[in-house]
Amino acid sequence: MINAKTKRTRQILAGLHMMGLDKLYQQFENELGIIITLHHVAPHAPKTFDPNAHLTVDPEFLDAAIGLLKARGFELVDLDGALERIAEPKRGRRFAVLTFDDGYRDNLVHAKPVLNRHDAPYTIFIAPNLMDGTACIWWEAIERIVATRDNLMVQMDGDNTLLDCSFTEAKYRSFDVLLGWMTKLVPEEDVQARIAELCLLNKIDPAELTRDQIMSWDELHEIAADPHCTIGAHTMNHAAVARLQPEAALAEMVQSATVLEAHFGERPRHFAYPYGYKAAAGARDFELAKEAGFASAVTTRPGLIFPQHVKHVTALPRISANGLFQKMRYFGPLTTGLPTRLNRGMRKLDVA
């Protein structure tokens, strides 16, 4: 179900594309490059109820998006290459970095062949407890629960709340209620326990759900053997670090790097904040990422990379390759950064 905000955004992006304003703007901008966020890459499977549709793009879209970046003069580099360009802005032409969050199995099955055809470097950010199945991809779990119920009783903050799931629009509303509850009201350290309880009551195995979608350690080793692939850290439990106490947030960062180092013999240099928006990662956490020893850390705050980011390499923005915007008339304008700049009063940086 496409909401009014998505429809309006599509219209704006398509308008910029039709008038050629995105290409014109890019000729005069001084950005260094762009970091792209992806999650799932899989063939389109239409569903009536699909609240996580924004997390999935088709392999054909990924291929077209990389082709567009190349056609617009972006050089595909890894995150180390991006840091070199940020440190020495005159080093080369505009760069593009491809990043994948969470380690979905389809990254190996569907994304890797496309990436290899383009000789494209890429980074996959891993939360080790997702690989082990001891943490759950809870946003997929609540989708599964809501999809299979006509109504749902949930105890929220001590009160029993009955959610209507009897028709598609109601399912979307109920999903949004659960999403807001998990991300705003449930303490971050309790999220995995609460989703486990909800799954148990609704006869869903959260570990099995996660194993079905996330790569095993053997599969991760297989993709990590690709010389184009870099493994980055993503906390232990896919935690919104801003919602944790400083010691716990730092431990999530450091421990994830330590576990990945034990598996691959090399400590990750790069980190992605789970969720990555302001409420999930803020200025305090940017400093913690430095303390944890990461050379860079990426958010999901939208934006391009500018020379001024040299002082903010643990607060780097990304542009989402969003499953609801899988047309070049939408993606093209996004690569210029113009929509983001217009949305925040033409400010280049968003690092506070």
Image (tube, rainbow, N blue to C red):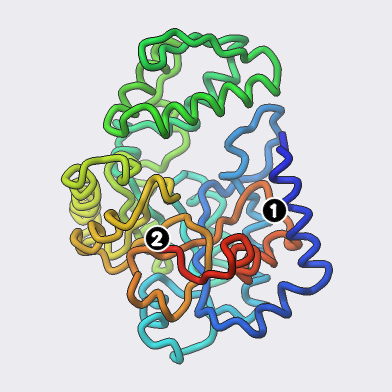
Residue at image point 48% right, 51% down:
108
- Residue 40: x and y in percent read 54, 46
Between 292 and 42, the one nearer to me in the picture: 292
User: Which mark's residue is nearer the viewer, 2 or 1?
Assistant: 2
- Position of residue 112 relative to residue 177, above or below, is below
Residue 147 position in % (x across, y down): 60, 20
Residue 246 place in picture, x, y as percent: 20, 47
Q: Is residue 148 left or right of residue 349?
A: right
Which secondary structure, mark 1?
loop
Question: Marks 1 and 2: in contact by CB < 8 Å?
Answer: no
Q: Position of residue 159 (x, y in %)?
A: 41, 9
Q: Which residue is mark 1?
A: 326
Task: Describe the element under mark 2 as helix, strand or loop.
Answer: strand
| Amino acid at the residue labelled 2 | Val
Mark 1 surroundings: few (<14), some (14-19) or many (≥20) residues within 10 A: some
Q: Is residue 211 in view?
A: no
The circle on residue 303 is none
For residue 182, side relative to residue 164 (left or right): left
> Where does the N terminus fall, quadrant-wise?
top right
Picture residue at 51% right of the left edge, 57% below the top = 37
Question: Given the image, on which type of amino acid does mark 1 rest?
Answer: Gln
Circle count:
2
Q: Nearer the viewer, residue 286 or 133?
A: 286
Tell me the number on the disc at residue 298: 2
